[in-house]
């Protein structure tokens, strides 16, 4: 009798597995569909890359002191920490004809296009130096608000519509598109200067190469968002709940759905916090790169720290090329990450390779050898874009609060940047005011991040 029951149970278990396997196979998306989900990230990332490569350059041109440069970088993560949780919570509860996440993408893109046309003109509209910096700060705040509003839906779409077995691939595709967009954004000023667009301007005025690059990014964002709107169709509520195994309360809402952020944090899975610790070190590291790499390159390779000089502007263009090399390394490494059998090993390996790249920048004086350093930083960036969201969305499978948690998780990206920005001037003083030395600080933070990966529990 016991033996018969055991056989019956074994049969039922196998049947359940076969059924689940069949359901997973029918829900698997094609490579084209996975790419469509994240394609708009390409356009948004062009704008983000232009901002990353040119904010320090823009405000240095407007007259900012190097010791206060990091303070201008507080706004981007601060706006992300405010906006993305709001977008996450709100979109979890949004079901309309346009979709669940896409309405927020459209709104964010519209504002981003307007601001991309205004920010690089901060010094070109006849304002005093202080007024130009204030205008630039307001535009930077609006730009980050809009980019964060447009960027978050793409992360959520993967969490919403992709099976657990495909998520590493899906986020790697997103990482690929992100870095491809970065390459385009980073090289825009260099290419425009190469074809003859003026790369210098009057003191306090942003060069035309930067201005026209921002205009081009605005146009590309429009094209990418239109493509996403046409190609991506989100699941209706009932299908979404069935896909994720979420019970309905009978009133059309999901059981366990909440917009209480404190309650969500209390019940967050351990993965949320352990991956967040790794994120802290990684994003503080990259904040220092974005802030001080232009000055480090100008100092090491061009021998100048004078932001008004033609040499500094030339170094600024070269920084765009270096960032493009980093993005190229990220593109290649994003294709390698899914081949690792253990994603933890992929994470640690990627961060340690990046740390070597950062530390080497302190010693390199040749602008072309710097390309190798940035190539080594690429794997760290690729891992940061793909693996944290793979770990987290797998841990959140079955919760109706996916968007809210992804929005809150963005705080593990934003908060370390805010802290690093607040401490940037003090750290710069500790290393003797040397912007190249800040690359050693950045590399050390990445090593700490690699050590913290062992705390992650899948």
Image (cartoon, grey):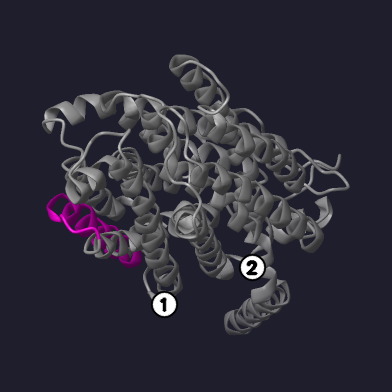
Q: Secondary structure at mark 1?
A: helix
Residue bounds of the magenta highlight: 345-367
* Comparing labels 1 and 2, the label whose residue is closer to the camera: 2
Q: Residue 182: image x %, image y %?
A: 49, 56
Q: Are marks 1 and 2 in contact (CB under 8 Å)?
A: no
Q: Is residue 275 above or below residue 26?
A: above
Residue at (64% x, 61% y) in the render? 39
Q: Which numbered disc covers residue 35?
A: 2
Picture quadrant where residue 104 is located: top right
Q: Which mark is residue 339?
A: 1
Quadrant where the N terminus is found in the figure: bottom right
Q: Quick one: quadrant of the C terminus?
A: bottom left
Residue 4 position (above or below residue 193)? below
Percent position of residue 439, x then y = 21, 45
Nearest to the observer: residue 168 or residue 194 = 194
Q: Is residue 361 magenta?
A: yes
Frontmost residue, 390 versus 188: 188
Query: Circle 2 sits in a helix, a strand or a loop, which is it?
Result: helix
Q: Residue at x 30, y 54 (%)?
A: 453
Q: Is residue 105 visible?
A: yes
Left or right, 69 with respect to 252, comes to: left
How far across and how far down the image is residue 147, in percent? 59, 40
Could you classify mark 1 by the number of other residues whose Cα lies within 10 Å: few (under 14), some (14-19), or many (20 or more)?
few
Lateral position of residue 31 relative to residue 103, left or right: left
Q: Earlier in the sequence, mark 1 or mark 2?
A: 2
Of residue 365 and residue 359, the one placed in the foreground of this image is 365
Up/down of 204 relative to 301, above or below: above
Q: CA distance from mark 1 to mark 2?
A: 18 Å
Residue at horizontal 53 percent and vertical 70 percent from the top: 169
Residue lying at 60% horizontally and 81% vertically, measured from the top left: 10
């Amino acid at each position: 009798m016991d033996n018969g029951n055991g056989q019956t149970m074994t049969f039922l278990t196998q049947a359940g597995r076969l059924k689940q396997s069949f359901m997973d196979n029918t829900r698997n998306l094609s490579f084209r569909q996975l790419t469509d989900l994240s394609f708009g990230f390409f356009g948004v990332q062009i704008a983000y890359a232009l901002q990353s490569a040119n904010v320090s350059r823009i405000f240095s041109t407007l007259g900012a002191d190097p010791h206060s440069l990091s303070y201008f970088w507080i706004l981007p993560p601060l706006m992300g920490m405010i906006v993305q949780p709001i977008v996450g919570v709100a979109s979890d509860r949004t079901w309309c004809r346009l979709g669940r996440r896409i309405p927020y993408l459209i709104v964010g893109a519209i504002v981003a296009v307007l601001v991309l046309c205004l920010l690089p003109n901060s010094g070109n509209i006849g304002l005093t130096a202080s007024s130009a910096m204030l205008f630039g700060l307001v535009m930077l705040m609006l730009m980050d608000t809009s980019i964060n509003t447009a960027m978050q839906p793409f992360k959520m779409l993967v969490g919403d519509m992709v099976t657990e077995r495909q998520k590493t691939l899906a986020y790697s595709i997103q990482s690929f598109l992100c870095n491809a967009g970065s390459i385009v954004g980073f090289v825009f000023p260099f290419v425009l200067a190469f074809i003859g667009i003026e790369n210098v301007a009057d003191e306090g005025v942003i060069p035309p190469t930067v201005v026209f690059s921002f205009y081009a990014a605005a146009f590309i964002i429009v094209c990418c968002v239109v493509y996403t709107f046409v190609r991506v169709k989100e699941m209706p509520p009932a299908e979404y709940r069935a896909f994720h195994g979420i019970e309905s309360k009978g009133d059309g809402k999901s059981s366990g759905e909440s917009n209480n952020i404190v309650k969500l944090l209390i019940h967050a899975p351990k993965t949320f916090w352990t991956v967040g610790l790794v994120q802290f070190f990684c994003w503080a590291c990259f904040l220092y790169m974005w802030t001080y790499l232009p000055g480090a390159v100008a100092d090491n390779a061009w021998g100048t720290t004078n932001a008004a000089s033609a040499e500094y502007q030339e170094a600024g263009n070269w920084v765009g090329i270096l960032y493009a090399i980093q993005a190229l390394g990220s593109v290649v490494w994003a294709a390698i990450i899914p081949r690792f059998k253990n994603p933890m090993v992929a994470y640690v390996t990627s961060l340690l390779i990046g740390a070597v790249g950062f530390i080497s920048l302190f010693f390199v004086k040749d602008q072309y050898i710097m390309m190798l350093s940035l190539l080594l930083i690429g794997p760290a960036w690729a891992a940061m874009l793909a693996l944290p969201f793979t770990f987290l969305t797998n841990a959140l499978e079955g919760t109706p609060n996916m968007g809210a948690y992804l929005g809150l998780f963005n705080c593990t990206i934003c908060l370390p940047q805010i802290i690093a920005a607040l401490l940037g001037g003090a750290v710069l003083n500790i290393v003797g005011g040397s912007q190249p030395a800040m690359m050693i600080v950045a590399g050390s933070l990445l090593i700490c991040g690699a050590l913290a990966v062992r705390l992650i529990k899948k």
